[in-house]
Image (cartoon, rainbow, N blue to C red):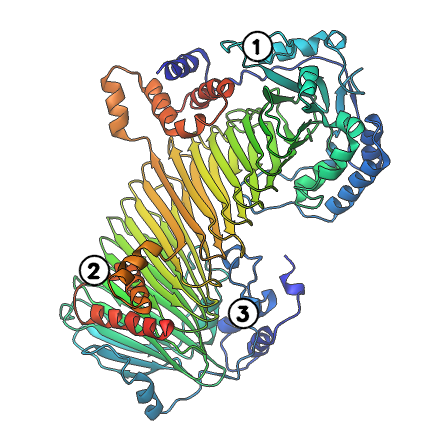
Amino acid sequence: MPAVQETIDQVKTIDVDQYKYGFETDIESEKAPQGLNEDVIRFISEKKGEPEWLLEWRLDAFERWKAMEEPDWARVNYPKIDFQSLYYYSAPKGLGEGPKSLDEIDPEILKTYEKLGIPLQEQEILAGIAPENRVAVDAVFDSVSVVTTFKEELAKEGVIFCPISEAVHSHPELVKKYLGSVVPLSDNYYSALNSAVFSDGSFVYIPKGVRCPMELSTYFRINEQNTGQFERTLIIADEGAYVSYLEGCTAPMRDENQLHAAVVELVTHDDAEIKYSTVQNWYPGDAEGKGGIYNFVTKRGDCRGKNSKISWTQVETGSAITWKYPSCILRGDNSVGEFYSIAISNGMQQIDSGTKMVHLGKNTSSRIISKGISAGKSSNTYRGLVSAHKKASNARNFTQCDSLLIGDKCGAHTVPYIESKNATAQFEHEATTSKISDDQLFYCLQRGIGEEEAIALIVNGFAKEVLQQLPMEFAVEAQKLVGISLEGSVG
Amino acid sequence: MTQSNQAKTPFEEWIAAHANDSNITDNAKDILVKLADKGLPTRRTETYKYTDLKALLKKAPKTINPLIDVASLEQIIAGNAVQEATQIIVANGNLIQANEAKGIVVSTRAPSALPNLPEGTETDTALLLASSLASQEISLNINSDAANAEKPIEIILIGSGDDALITNKLAIEVSGDQSPEIIMTYLTSANPTIFSFVECHAKSGEVSIIKRQKQGAQSAHFETFVMSQTSDATLKVNQLNLGAHTVRNGLYSCFNGEATAHLDLSGVTIANEKAHIDTTLVVDHAVANCTSEERFKNAIGGQAKSVFQGKIIVQPDAQKTDARMMCQSLLLSEDASVDVKPELEIFADDVQCGHGATIGEMDEDLLFYLKSRGLPEKDAKRMLILAFLSENLEELEEGIVKSTLQQDIDDYLNIIIA
């Protein structure tokens, strides 16, 4: 298989513990005053020229957040975050008011994206991809969106793809209707914080019956020191619409921890489908666990309409701590939820991630495939909920979560919650944990494949079910990541 | 957490009042004061997420371990005991009769202090209440002089009395190479709430412990079963839950021997009406080379609710562990519900661990097959449920115990399906 060979090559060229996106862009920035209070929220809102209702909404969220307690149920340990020592807004100078044309953007920023391999020129395409497989990109740098490509072409189809700060002005009725309708203000500690201080993110609206002509993607980059990134993404697929959305993220290597608390809301109406893929590659910290991103994210999709579908695919390799449960509320009859995940933890990383499939409508079905790989001294937890409510007759779920441990200093945990209040619901759950089989390893070694390559090969086979679900552009990237993350795992 | 700020229920107030009783030991007082202060666990405590004990146990008991006359004992036992077994009778927490045989020693003493608690039992109400309020600690010792598994040993634990609180504290220790079958049969009259704390230590051989919970529909049952195994002992625990409106079975196992040991845990639950049946277990593999298997089957009808929380822990040193856990639930009615949480917590890499859970209703095709062959619907259903549940008895040796258990299930199903 050529893809696997590619992984093996990738493993060879990159050194142990080398996070290749760890560089820093030296650029002047404009920040909000340090700390968190009403004035900072007013500052952010004013910077973005927001309408009064949104400012009220933010302040309401802030009030609720103050009354909430930081959750402690996840299997992660970290020193208490001092929320007053952070900067809640940071934008490259001159970009405060949102994206402009490419010519006006600081060449340093353009260079950053070039280095990261993100095409911001519309004529550019990802290496090795046929021209028809174009990807529209929204690039978010710290707290602002730098540029959004292919906007005009998408607009021809009626597709709205723009930074959310722009959508507040251009499509206030849509933002007002859907913002916070899936993840309410006071849903949880971090979503409330996000609602109060969210900076930028993408807004997508696919009108009735439209199949989005290209993949949409957002690339998040944290650059500034001591800042948190609080992006907000809202995707709406109207009746019969389809969209595939990709998300990528990286950050520089720093000794201190940085906070990333995002909220992603998806809404599908009748017969609509959203496919949401993430390759999460935030800086994971060094081998001793110094630095790295705290990734506390709330992602939820609401299958509001009949026959609608939401599919989450995630490849988690980065972040010092991951706390993330992309979920599906299967409200519409016959709606479908899917969750495919590979979570790879190395070094001192801690992952507590999984999904929630809440079956409310009739004949709803969901599928969960989760693969966790722990290496080094990391801890990797799958935490998931599958529930069928009283009216969810004929609900179906199949869950498979497998864990692979590499080395004897790491931990793998599975915490599934399965709740059924309807007799016609059928739930199946299975999970296994094992180490790389000696037989498989021997088979590879005996055929002349080096130990490290053999492990990458076996792990790729193990993770293949998930990788197959990724859009092609990301599948290639993700296979490389699987290789990189396991670097140095064998003695 | 704000548990202590919530209004105290009559049951909690009863505990607080009892802590001031001059008759109890300092040790018991200590436990009760803490318990009264913290209150009973609610959904906020993770291990009680699906069983809100504060809400389920509100009523204050009228009496604790009341005296019981022999005539009524016989009435309760009649027809419920295992034939041919060596009987040990415990009524309302006190040893009444012990038919000792060679190598089987039954003794009582004042309750001892709390042992080192295994993980997950810090908030275990049955353990804490039984430890502090038991009138005596009953120990059953089976040593190498015992004749090899000739007769099963049956401990009949009886609870009786209007709104009575019954506490049992029991310690079972088996040494020697025999393979005894020990049965614990729970029976009740009136509406007592039974709290039992059972410790079982298997030092060698193959020990089989079977619980037959056949309490009346008005009673409640809380049992915490803490087991430990050393060297190459095999422990088989089978639990039948066929009664009581509120049940919590806590099963805590720890492997601390050096050589291979095997644990086999299985359970059958049939619940009806508004019963709430919770099985919570923790299997802690602390040492290498041990194996464990857990199989639980539930058939839930009426508006009953079944809860299964299982956790397998594999500690860093427990290499070559093989642990399996399976919980299957069959929902028999529209209003029945099931909550399952099969957890794995793994810190060693060279292990095999698996867990599975299924929830569903009866297969219509199977039912149709039987009906098309002339079986009335009721009989066809009964046959399918029986087939589903009996799988968990297959591991048992053929004999009087197995056939009694089969009969127990059969009898209870007849009541439920009618």
Label 2 vs label 3, nearer the camera: 3
**Residue under pointer 1:** A125
The local secondary structure at tag 1 comes to loop
Q: Amino acid at mark 2?
A: Glu
Left or right of A160? Residue B381 is left
The local secondary structure at tag 2 comes to strand
Kindly identify the residue that appears in the image at 57 percent across and 31 percent down.
A274
Left or right of A94? Residue A308 is left
Label 1 vs label 3, nearer the camera: 1
Residue B57 seen in render: yes
Label 2 chain ID = B
As drawn, the label of residue B206 is 2
The answer to which of A130 and B213 lies nearer the viewer is: A130
Image position of B411 with respect to A296: above or below: below
Q: Residues within 10 Å of mark 3 (few under 14, many from 20)?
A: few
Kindly report the distance in space between the C-alpha atoms of the residues bearing marks 2 and 3: 37 Å
**Residue under pointer 3:** B56
Kindly report the distance in space between the C-alpha atoms of the residues bearing marks 1 and 3: 63 Å
Left or right of A139? Residue B192 is left
Kindly identify the residue that appears in the image at 28 percent across and 41 percent down.
B320
The answer to which of B221 and B365 lies nearer the viewer is: B365
Label 1 chain ID = A
Is tag 2's residue or tag 3's residue first in the polypeptide sequence? Answer: 3
- Residue A200 is situated, as x and y percent measured from the top left of the image, at 72, 27
Label 2 vs label 1, nearer the camera: 1
Q: Amino acid at mark 1?
A: Ile
Kindly report the distance in space between the C-alpha atoms of the residues bearing marks 2 and 1: 68 Å
Q: Amino acid at mark 3?
A: Leu
- Residue A141 is situated, as x and y percent measured from the top left of the image, at 69, 20
